[in-house]
Image (cartoon, grey):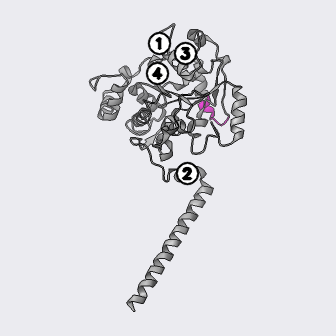
Amino acid sequence: MGAKREPQRRWHRKLAAAACALALATLALRLAASRPGAAQHWLASVNIEQRAGVPRRCGSDGRATYAWMNPVQFNRTFTRARGTALFLVGCGHSGTTPLTALLQRHPGVFVYAPSADLEYAIKPDSFSPLLGSSQNDRATLDRLARGNAWLVKSPSNVCRLGYILMHVPSARVVALVRDGRDVMLSLMERYPDADPAGDLCLGRWVHDNTALLLYERDPRLLIERYEDLFEGAPRYPSLRRILGHYGVTYDNVADLMARPASDAHGSTSAKASAAHTRLRAQQVSKPLRTAAPRWPAELSPALKRTFKRDKAAVRLLVRFGYANDSNW
C-alpha cells in the first residue's frame, strides 16, 4: 500500500511544480503587459553575471542597478577605433550642464536631447546599432546630426557604462567628477526632505563615482574634474583634453567659449518638464565658468561629521584630489 502511495506523491509533486511554473509564467506575461520596462529589466538580468564592485543603487533617485548595466564581458568588444558616438556622464550636479553648453557651440558636435529624456533611455536592446529601439530612431538621429558627432548628455548613464561600451565599442565617454562636499550640498537642495547621508545625497555621489571607477583604466573613458574645466586661460587644458578625447579638437577654445549660445547644435525633446527646461535654460545662459566651492562656508559641523563617517566618501575625496585625508 505504501509503495503505491509513493508514485502518487511523486506525481502530485510534479503536478504542483508544473502549476507553480505556469503561475509564474502567467505573472511574468502580465508584468510584461502592464510594466514592460520592469519586465525587461528582470528578464535582462537573468543569466547575466554582473561585474564585481557595482553599487546596489546608482543614479538619479537612487534607483536599483541591474546586471545588464555592467556585465563582466563588457570589454570583449574593445576597439581603439573612434566613432561618432559621444557620451557625457557623472554624478548629478557635477557640472555636466555647463560643459554641455560649451560642446553645443562646437560646429562638429550635435547634442541629442540634453534633457531628462535620456536619463534612463539606455537599456537592454536600446542600440540599433547606436541609440534607439528602431532604425527610425537612428535615421532621425543621423538627420538631426547631419553627419556631425552626436553627444548624449545623461549623468546617470555612469551607472551603465559596461552596457554602453559593450554595445557601442567605438564610443568615447567623458565623466565629470566634482568635490563631494559641494555635490552633497547641491543634492540636499534638490531633495530637502532626504537623508543627507542617504541614496539621494551623499550616497548618490559615492555610488555613482564607485560605478565610474570600475572603468577608469579603459582608454575610451576620460575622467576630468569640474573644478578644472574653465581654468588655465587662454589654453584651458582640461577642455582641450576633453575635445581631444572626443575627437573634435578646436584651435581656439577661448573663442569657442565666447561664441553665442545661439550657435548651439542640439535637440531638446518636449518630454522634459517645464521646470526642468527652465532650470537648464537658466544654467546655460550664465557665463561659462566654474562655480566657487560652497562647502567651506556652508557645510555645517554636523554635515562634516556625516561626510567623514562615510569611509567610502572620504576615500573618493582623496582619490580625486580634493583632500589628503579626513582632517579638513
Three-letter amino acid code at the position of disc 3: Leu
Per the model, the C-alpha gap separating discs 2 and 1 is 43 Å
Residue 71 in the image: above or below residue 316: below
Three-letter amino acid code at the position of disc 2: Ala
Dot 3, how many residues are within 10 Å of its Cα: few (below 14), some (14-19), or many (20+)?
A: some
**Which quadrant is home to the C terminus?**
top left
Per the model, the C-alpha gap separating discs 2 and 4 is 34 Å
Per the model, the C-alpha gap separating discs 3 and 2 is 39 Å
Which residue reaches farthest left?
Answer: 327
Q: Secondary structure at mark 3?
A: loop
Residue sitting at 42 percent across and 29 percent down?
A: 217
Do we see residue 66 in this rendering? no
Instruction: Name the residue beneath numbered marker 1.
Output: 231
- Picture quarter containing residue 306? top left
Dot 2, how many residues are within 10 Å of its Cα: few (below 14), some (14-19), or many (20+)?
A: few
Per the model, the C-alpha gap separating discs 1 and 4 is 10 Å
Specify the label residue 288 is tagged with.
3
Instruction: Name the residue beneath numbered marker 2.
Output: 38
x and y, in percent, of residue 151 in the image: 60, 28
Q: Secondary structure at mark 2?
A: helix
Residue sitting at 44 percent across and 42 percent down?
A: 57
Residue 64 in the image: above or below residue 267: below
Q: Mark 1 and mark 2 in contact (Cβ < 8 Å)?
A: no
Q: Secondary structure at mark 1?
A: loop
Instruction: Name the residue beneath numbered marker 4.
Output: 226
* The magenta stretch spans residue 275: yes
Dot 1, how many residues are within 10 Å of its Cα: few (below 14), some (14-19), or many (20+)?
A: some
Which callout, 3 or 2, points to the residue nearer the camera? 2
Residue 103 in the image: above or below residue 123: above
What segment carries the magenta color?
270-277
Q: Earlier in the sequence, mark 3 or mark 1?
A: 1
